[in-house]
Image: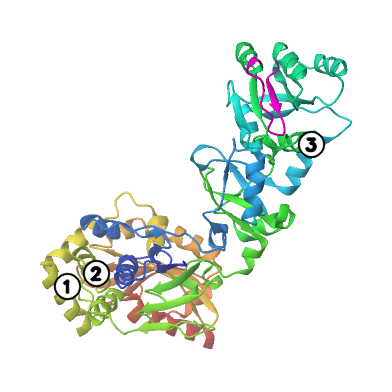
Amino acid sequence: MKTVYVIGHRNPDSDSIISATAYARLKQLMGHPEYVAARAGNLSPQTEYILGRFSVPAPQYVPDLIPKVSYYMTHNCETVSYDTSLWKAVNAMEERDRKVLPVVKEDNQYVSLLHYSAFAKNVLKIVNPEKSAAITTSIGLISETLSAQPVITFNEDELFKSFTLVAGSQFETFKKRLAMHAPENTIVITGDRKEIQEYCTMEKVRAIIITSGYTPDKGIRELAEKNGVSLLISPYDTSATSMLIIYSSPVSSMANQELAPLNINDTIKKVRPILQRAPGGTLPVVDDNNTIVGVISESDLLNEASIEVCLVDHNELSQAVEGLENYKIREVIDHHRLGSFSTRYPITFINRPVGATCTIVTNLYRQYHVSIPREIACILLCGILTDTLVLQSATTTDEDRETAEYLSNITNLDIQTLGQDIITASSSLKGRSAEAVTKQDMKEFNEKGHKFTVSQIEVSSPSEILERKEEFFKMLESVRSSRSCLFSALMVTDIIHLTSIMLVAAEPAFLQVMEIPRTDHENIFILKDIVSRKKQLIPLLSEQIEKLENA
């Protein structure tokens, strides 16, 4: 199932965060659990206060939507425990048609990767006729691989490096061969040759495997028990038993331990060439705790991503989370001007000339006859009040007022009291850096080919900003130059007197044509009775850009 992120603009304000939270909850209540509230930036102090007051969790932080492994991988992949026999692991790969099989320890911690190249390479080391190679195994793994009948066993789970001898030669010759190996690490495969069984038991070999289902004499069993020799009966003949015992090694000894897994947050750009070189074009994926969470293959990159997006409180790509263009946009719910936004397919697009996106979302609950949970109704009311300056902004409509009254009635919250609480909790700048204030609610615009940014901060008095003006000018210039903008502005709105001032860092040519009243500082402008960025300030700034074009 795809995840649909409901997400606002970068540097989100309260209306953006709350509308994302409330709309995702509405979709969930309507039977769409795939909708998840998300945010593209940090919470402002105002938003933190609102969510904390009504005990509503913050949306999931999604700093960008640059294509990542997690959006294309196969989740819940098959794994195999590191102490499983190679035989069982290879059979699992065959049965499930897997190119690779991650090997894990407790809690799904990644250890290594079993793939056919690694398996073939390690098996060749063992079956090389010019070398006498030992295999790591245990009595339990041998018994499991051979489907053997244990007669008597010792230390079943203890791993050891073993040499395997097939008693196919004459007795005297066999004794010489056995003498070349440490008996405590030697496994002898024999048929119904009592003299071999008795001699090996006396020599205290690690294990005797009797083939073709032959049963040892009771005397051999008693001698084996006395000397600590494990005794197993294989249902297979000597040839098949000798071959299968190789597969009794734990899968960890045959897997590739040098092949690093991919991280769930790795970008597709980074992993694409790595996958091209990987065995079978497939690699395991781990999280930051090295826990296996899936696998990804080259073919997965040809599929659609596992996420889609619903935009709230904006419809301009310049304000959207980075990487948005890589995904399907399902819906847009907004109250701003239309930007240069287009899709290749029809979508739900709701844009209304109201003061807050929260107004639209509230009325969608009412339109669909879905009861609003109380905590959601509380934050929706807060969202409307913050985006309309407690219903006093020029953007406020009758629909905002009626919706706020409706939410006030069902939550038993007084509009003026709640509005004052929000103002008191969020208007202080004490301890906040110029960067934090400037980027808290900053939006980027593009007008006639000119990029610019406008940040807005609401305060009970602009005096503190003015006292620190040089600090803010330096920050604005940093933003302007780093983004190659015509100008960067900070709109400081006095929520008591419902007016604003604006600090601007701009190219000299633009400052010269600006016809907006100024203070005694050439970069500080007076915005009398202007409190709305979208409805009042942006049209005014567009006029100034037009003057620059005509100069």
> What span is in magenta?
205-219
Q: Label 2 belongs to which residue?
A: 380
Front of the two marks 2 and 3: 3
Residues at circles 2 and 1 in contact by the CB criterion of under 8 Å: yes
In terms of image quadrants, where is residue 17? bottom left
**Residue at the image position 36 percent from the left and 55 percent from the top:** 468
Q: Earlier in the sequence, mark 2 or mark 3?
A: 3
**Residue at the image position 25 percent from the left and 74 percent from the top:** 388
Residue 2 lies, with reference to residue 169, above or below; the image says below
| Residue type beneath disc 2 | Leu
Residue 354: x percent and y percent?
28, 82
Q: Label 3 belongs to which residue?
A: 239
- Residue 529 visible somewhere in the drawing: no
Q: Which residue is most to the bottom?
A: 550
Pointer 3: residues within 10 angstroms few (<14), some, or many (20+)? few
Q: Indicate the colouring scheme.
A: rainbow
In terms of image quadrants, where is residue 367? bottom left
